[in-house]
Amino acid sequence: MVPRARGRRWPVPLLVLVLLTALTVHLAGDDGTGGGAARSGAPVPACTPWQVATTGSAAEPRPSARQQAARSRLAGLKLLSYYPAQAPWSRMWQNWQPGRVDADFARINGLGANAVRLMVHAETFGYPDPDQARLAELRQAVSLAARHGLTVQLTLFDWWNDYTDLAGSDRWTHALLDPYRDDPRIAFVELKNEVDPGDRAAVAWVRHELPTARQAAGHLPVTVSVTGSDPVARLAALRDALTGDPPDFYDLHYYGEAGYARAVFEAAEAVVAPAPLYIGETGTATAPGDGTAQAGAEAAQDLYLRTVEWAARSAGLPAAAPWIFQDISPGDVPDGASRAPEDLDFGLLRADGSEKPAAASLRAQFTGPGIGTDFNGDLSGGQNGTPDDWTAHDASAAQAFWDPEDGHRGPGSAVLSGTSGAAGRSPSYLVEPVEQPTAAGQRVRLTAWARGVRATGRSTIAVTWFDRNGTYLGEDESPPLPAGSSGWRRLSVDSTAPACAAAAVLALKSRGNTGQARFTEVTFSVHP
């Protein structure tokens, strides 16, 4: 089998792309004359079905005993996917190094995780009759995990799609799982990684193999996972295909826009209810470049993972499972797998074993104060003229840069200079905050300190709203900075989440400015 590349999927944030159009629509009608806080809106789209509260409906189905047990088992799970950096995919087993695995499991435990995901490749282990040496390696891996306080997620049938061989599948499933029946060292079993619900042969095989896996696993939960650009639709398709005999819970692998995560998770929960939902993979790459590019990508990874983890927690789900423990060494990738940096650099640790910022954030979530909801609001962090966490929009119509020296109470500011006065152009810096509103009508407040340097045109801060499908719902913006040069002054705007709002994007904006607008000390708060 050809290894499927893990790198995903949408290198330019979807919300940012949508916002470009939204700001164009808004500013096309902006006369730049200033005034008070402004609200710009578009027709509110219809909510998707899972965003509409239902009344008088039939009683919801009750979860099965296995589904209830799975929910209990998932609660408190803190899991990381794992391959050794120098022995990924099939090479983990072909080049078995128990000492390295033992050391890695100790570090995974040190991050506060209590579970590790191991992927078992059918052809590598031997199919349909596994090689005894490979089974011994798996036994040793499970024992090493237990030594470090880690239970194991077993992912079966990786790199395999011989869906018509039902008898062989049954033999292999029993050979792998019978030794672990009801084993408390096993957290759960994933029958198949990222099933395509549109593949009729794959779905028919899942329908056949789920009961076999449950029989072999005993009381251990058994699941299958999906992913994709519309994971809710894929979950719905899989649910429909498995209505007669569903898995014990559904596993969603999420690589979409971080700001949408909570809305997607709520939608997914509604689709699969009463079965539990688990976010079994999530992450974003930190493709290497020069030192400054790497540092900026690692800051973006940290913000992404904290945003998704916050979304999972606020939706009442267990902690999402980051992909993956450590970056993968390109020279050790098996033949046929992608060696592209964007496929290999999802790790919480770099290939040399040093920690990225996301590792410290995950440790804080798993063992300490919880999920940090901050972003680079004070504009103190950045590399090579680019502020961490912020995306420059329409920068071709302006000089947009990060000044590490100039600020209000501390150094650091985002600068927009020489911005275009053309209709529909809105040079801006954008960020998606970790904490998002969770219901229509919630109040939010955005503040920033700003100053003009020979400023003209209109410079403001704004909160822009989108629904789960990326439809622009409207925007509230602050009063503008005055023209000319001024000292630092506080800008503020209050906004209310409209119906169907899934995400807010924060914007620092300047239009028609032949001088400069400087922004720093940005804060965002969500009120109950």
Image (cartoon, helix red, strand yellow):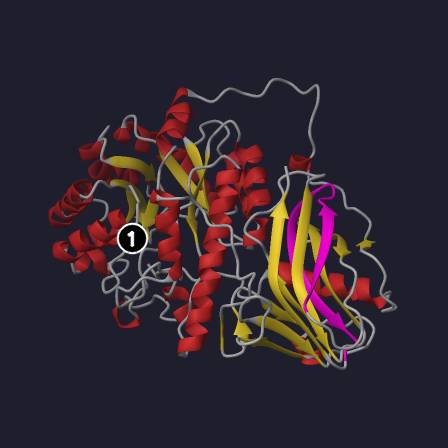
* Secondary structure beneath label 1: loop
Horizontally, residue 261 falls left or right of residue 75, namely right
Residue 39 is one of the magenta-drawn residues? no
- In this rendering, the answer to whether 25 lies above or below 471 is below
Q: Give the range drawn in magenta.
A: 488-513
Residue 40 in the image: state x and y as whole percent. 81, 55
Q: To which quarter of the image does residue 101 belong?
A: bottom left
Along the line of sight, the residue nearer the viewer: 342 or 180: 342
The C terminus lies in which quarter of the figure? top right
Count how many numbered circles sit on residues in the image: 1
- Residue found 44% across the figure and 28% down from its top: 245
Choose between 393 and 342: the one closer to the eye: 393
x, y percent for residue 105: 22, 50
Quadrant of res 336: bottom left
Q: Is residue 471 left or right of residue 522?
A: right
In percent of width and height, residue 133 lies at: 11, 49
Q: Nearer the viewer, residue 525 or 56?
A: 525
The reply to whether the magenta stretch includes residue 506 is: yes
User: In this rendering, does residue 120 appear at all?
Assistant: no
Specify the principal SS of the magenta part. strand
User: What residue sits 70% from the left and 52% below the top?
Assistant: 465
What crowding class fits label 1: few (fewer than 14 Cα within 10 Å), some (14-19), or many (20 or more)? many
Relative to the observer, which residue lies in front, 200 or 7? 7
Can residue 243 be spotted in the picture?
yes
Residue name at image x 13 percent, y 54 percent: 98
Figure check: 500 above or below 415: above
* In the image, residue 454 above or below residue 76: below
Image quadrant where one finds the N terminus: bottom left
Disc 1 marks a residue whose amino acid type is Tyr
Per the image, the residue denoted by label 1 is 82
The quadrant in which residue 424 appears is bottom right
The spot of residue 12 in percent (x, y) is 57, 66
